[in-house]
Image: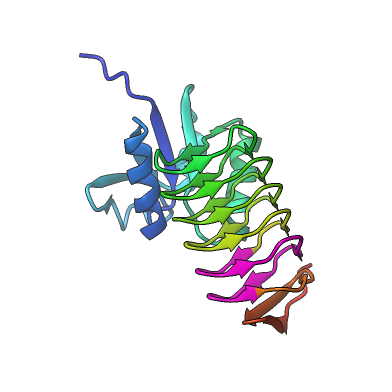
Amino acid sequence: MTNLKPIIAILGASGHGKVVADLAEQLGYEVSFYDDAYPTKTQLEHWDIVGTFNDLLACKVENVEVIVAIGNNVVRKQKCNELKQYGFDLARLIHPSATVSQYAKVAEGTVVLAGAVINAFAEIGHGCIINTSAVIEHDTKIGEYSHICPNTALAGAVKIGKCCWIGIGSQIIQLISVGDYTLVGAGSVVVKSLPANVTAFGSPAVVVKSDKKS
């Protein structure tokens, strides 16, 4: 009997990869993992790891979608861009228990996990992670390859730059901007806009480190 399930290749056999694979199966996909630890590592729980990133690039198959399940924003960006250059279709995975407004936009390569809420006219860029129970309020814009961690709440019209990390349990009040490549530490409360390339932490959040990117 022919297997009619769509196939998804998941790059990154890690803890986050497990969560993404579980979601993909719930959405009806058959999962194959790729990771550069192969062939030293050939299994992630019950899922087979079938090759490296270069193996994936070398064996592009029509009608196979790809998702990059790598937590590091910069590495995820690099891998997604290379896959697109090779002509791969990046999946967009949204958990059945997530609430996504009909007026919100979620770009390809993004994963929206269980219990997340994305409200009206919010926009989520390419390759983002909207993690478990995160709340993205109306008109908020998330730049590409950013990670919004579990139980984070972003109020209305917040702007998050590209490759940002908004730590678990953080809160950002309305109309705040966070610059590219900025990290907000776990449990922080952001009440003033933050520049690019900094680490901020606390309640209220203050800049504790500056790290200029080239």
Residue 153 image position (x, y, % from top left) = 57, 61
Region rendered in magenta: 165-189
Most distant residue in the bottom direction = 208
Is residue 84 placed above or below 205 in the rendered structure? Answer: above
Most distant residue in the top direction = 1
130 relative to 52 in the view: left or right: right
Q: Is residue 100 visible?
A: yes
Q: Is residue 31 visible?
A: no
Magenta span dominant secondary structure: loop
Q: Nearer the viewer, residue 54 or 198?
A: 198
Residue 33 image position (x, y, % from top left) = 37, 44
Identify the residue at horizontal 76%, vertical 60% (top origin): 175
Identify the residue at horizontal 52%, vertical 37% (top origin): 92
Q: Nearer the viewer, residue 33 or 57?
A: 33
Locate the N terminus and report the quarter of the image it occupies. Answer: top left
Total numbered badges shown on the rendered structure: 0
Residue 137 image position (x, y, % from top left) = 63, 51
Residue 152 within the segment the image draws in magenta: no
Residue 151 image position (x, y, % from top left) = 48, 63
Identify the residue at horizontal 79%, vertical 71% (top origin): 195
Identify the residue at horizontal 59%, vertical 32% (top origin): 102
Q: Nearer the viewer, residue 35 or 77?
A: 77
110 relative to 32 in the view: left or right: right
Locate the C terminus and report the quarter of the image it occupies. Answer: bottom right
Is residue 63 placed above or below 198 in the rendered structure? Answer: above
Q: Nearer the viewer, residue 170 or 149?
A: 170
Q: Quadrant of residue 148?
A: bottom right
Q: How is the image coloured?
A: rainbow
Residue 175 within the segment the image draws in magenta: yes
